């Protein structure tokens, strides 16, 4: 477990939470549900069910569940535990790891924004700054769900997106427009004989980014998600299980928590990553100087690592890491340890967020793996 001390009125995390990719992590959930991996940490309800609906609740960290149990009677009654997500603890990397069963070092989606060749690709929107976006297959080649045509119940607007093609390749797309239709699609698919249905709901993440974690909006969204879980359980037959997990948790930093990197700008050729897991690509020949300068500038707020250390120590997963994937990671990485985020001066819109994720603190890295039988 991570150690903490108290300075400036809040706990400082001393040790990063790095996942054991052979242990209880999100990479093993789909292989276990498909019967291709035997793990002791899969809830018995899920292991024994004839059919499973896997509901991924974007942004729902385990610590948020623990802190708000009074608002979450449905989730609180489910069987399960905390597991680890991947590094970086961000949607693009973690969802790809959930669907493919692979670590970021293996599938190559290593951040919200990442450098692909000479462009910085916004993975979720699949747009490259000033360049034509690459073919999704050239960025992430692995098929989802171990090559099985699993139905995916996600927002209809994602149907033709590049990220959808990258992390859901080979699946059957089923679009939903409201929470009621999400539940109804899952019910019908199970009744039609599907053994595994993958479903996705982004609301917790969206509300946390826009309103932060210290506002009634976040608690209201948690309560709404719990009702969604209850409606799903009511819709599913007793032979089916609902399994709930997430891609990451959240850290609140507010507007005052954004930290500028102006002092490093002269050494940086490109910025990428996430606010709490910032990639700095050095100007030619400046990697060592940038690492030293970043350590001096923000080492009290972040774990500052060089690319080789990050990859060779296995933070993003096992090696060997393909050269093309290595180049997607910054020469220097700022993994926030305090409740702060680091400004990307080339993507100022990100600085409007009030909460975020990507780093390796418990609030971001620990996610639920919960299960319960259907009640219909």
Image: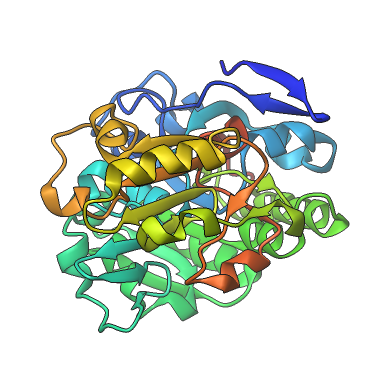
Name the colour scheme: rainbow
Q: Can you say whether 235 is above or below 36 in the image?
A: below
* Residue 282 position (above or below residue 128): above
Quarter of the view holding residue 254: bottom right
Where residue 220 sits, quadrant-wise, is: bottom right
Q: In the visual, does 336 lie left or right of 222?
A: left
Residue sitting nearer the eye, 227 or 22: 22
Left or right: residue 55 versus residue 219 is: left
Residues 173 and 280: in front is 280
Residue at left offset 12%, top offset 46%: 322
Q: Residue at x 60, y 28 (%)?
A: 79
Compared to residue 312, the image places residue 346 above or below, namely: below
Q: Is residue 221 left or right of residue 251?
A: right
Tell me which corner region of the image, top left, top right, bottom left or bottom right, holds residue 9: top right
Q: Which residue occupies 29% across, 31% down?
A: 309
x and y, in percent, of residue 145 in the image: 27, 51
For the question of whether residue 239 can be seen, the reply is: no
Whole-percent x and y of residue 270?
A: 35, 64
Numbered label tally: 0
Q: Position of residue 88 (x, y in %)?
A: 42, 44
Taking the image as drawn, is residue 221 in sight? yes
Q: Position of residue 209 (x, y in %)?
A: 66, 60
Compared across the picture, whether 58 is left or right of 198 comes to right
Quarter in which the N terminus is drawn: top right
């Amino acid at each position: 477990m991570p150690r903490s001390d108290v300075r400036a009125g809040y706990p400082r995390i001393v040790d990063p939470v790095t996942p054991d990719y052979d242990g209880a992590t999100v990479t093993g959930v789909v292989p276990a549900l498909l019967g291709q991996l035997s793990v002791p940490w899969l809830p018995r309800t899920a292991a024994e069910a004839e059919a499973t609906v896997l509901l991924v609740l974007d942004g729902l960290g385990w610590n948020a569940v623990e802190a708000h149990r009074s608002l979450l009677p449905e989730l609180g009654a489910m069987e399960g535990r905390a597991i680890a997500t991947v590094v970086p603890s961000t949607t693009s990397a973690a969802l790809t790891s959930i669907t493919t069963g692979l670590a970021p070092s293996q599938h190559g989606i290593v951040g919200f924004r990442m450098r692909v060749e000479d462009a910085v690709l916004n993975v979720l929107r699949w747009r490259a700054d000033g360049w034509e976006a690459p073919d999704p297959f050239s960025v992430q080649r692995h098929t989802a769900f171990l090559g099985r045509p699993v139905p995916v119940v996600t927002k209809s607007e994602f149907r033709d997106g590049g990220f959808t093609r990258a992390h859901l390749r080979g699946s059957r797309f089923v679009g939903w427009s409201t929470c009621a239709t999400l539940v109804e699609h899952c019910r019908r698919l199970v009744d039609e004989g599907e053994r595994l249905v993958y479903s996705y709901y982004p609301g917790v993440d969206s509300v946390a980014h826009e309103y932060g974690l210290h506002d009634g909006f976040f608690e209201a969204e948690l309560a709404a998600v719990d009702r969604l879980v209850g409606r799903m359980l009511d819709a599913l037959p007793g032979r089916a299980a609902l399994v709930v997990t997430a891609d990451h948790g959240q850290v609140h930093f507010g507007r005052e928590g954004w930290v500028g990197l102006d002092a490093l700008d002269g050494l940086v050729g490109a910025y990428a990553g996430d606010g709490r897991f910032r990639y700095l690509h050095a100007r030619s020949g400046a990697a060592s100087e940038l690492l030293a300068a970043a350590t001096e500038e923000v080492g009290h707020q972040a774990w500052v690592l060089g690319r080789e250390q990050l990859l060779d120590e296995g933070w993003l997963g096992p090696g060997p890491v393909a050269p093309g994937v290595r180049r997607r990671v910054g020469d220097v990485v700022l993994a926030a340890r305090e409740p702060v985020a680091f400004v990307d001066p080339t993507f100022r819109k990100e600085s409007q967020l009030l909460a975020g994720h990507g780093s390796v603190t418990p609030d971001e890295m620990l996610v639920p793996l919960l299960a319960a039988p259907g009640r219909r």
